[in-house]
Amino acid sequence: MLKRIFLILFLSLSGWAVQAQKQPVASATESAKRLASLYPNPAITYINIDLRENFKSGMSVQIHSAIMGKMIFSAQLSQARYVLNVNDYPRGAYVYYLLDASGKIVEAGKFLITK
């Protein structure tokens, strides 16, 4: 019985990994269209959120755990570059959302934290 559970778990996770590998890679033109640049990715102690010339007053950022979907950080952006300290965040995958002044999501992306 336990072997079946592990086999089912393994097969379901391996299928997830194959799906993740099939995701299209962003081209240079798609990267140029992005509003923000997050670096370094993967991050260890901090991550820069650089809005380049796309910064507008009233924008905010939200950080969510990619696994649980729980929002763990939110801030109003007052300048074109924001440095987020990730020392207290556990390693893993995270999703960021950039929101305009009305609260509409204008961009989403992901980053990793490694320790």
Image (spheres, rainbow, N blue to C red):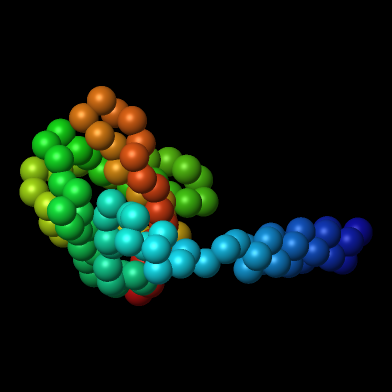
The answer to whether residue 48 is seen in the rendering is yes
Quarter placement of the N terminus: bottom right
The answer to whether residue 92 is seen in the rendering is no
Q: Quadrant of residue 89?
A: bottom left
Tag count: 0
Q: Does residue 84 lie above or below 99 as drawn?
A: below
| Picture coordinates of residue 29, whole percent (x, y) | 39, 63
Q: Quadrant of residue 21?
A: bottom right
| Picture coordinates of residue 85, whole percent (x, y) | 20, 60
Whether residue 62 sits left or right of residue 68 in the image: it is left
Quarter placement of the C terminus: bottom left
What residue lies at 19% left-to-right and 38% top-to-bottom?
59
Q: Does residue 27 lie above or below 57 as drawn?
A: below
> Residue 23 or 92: which is nearer the viewer?
23
| Picture coordinates of residue 39, whole percent (x, y) | 27, 68
Whether residue 67 sits left or right of residue 49 in the image: it is right
What residue lies at 24% left-to-right and 64% top-to-bottom?
47
What residue lies at 40% left-to-right and 68% top-to-bottom?
28
> Residue 92 or 41: which is nearer the viewer?
41
Whether residue 1 sits left or right of residue 71 in the image: it is right
| Picture coordinates of residue 66, whole percent (x, y) | 47, 51
Question: Which residue of the protein is positioned furthest toward the left in this rendering?
Answer: 79
Question: Which residue of the protein is positioned furthest toward the front in this rendering?
Answer: 29
Q: Does residue 51 lie above or below 48 as drawn?
A: above
What residue lies at 68% left-to-right and 61% top-to-bottom?
19
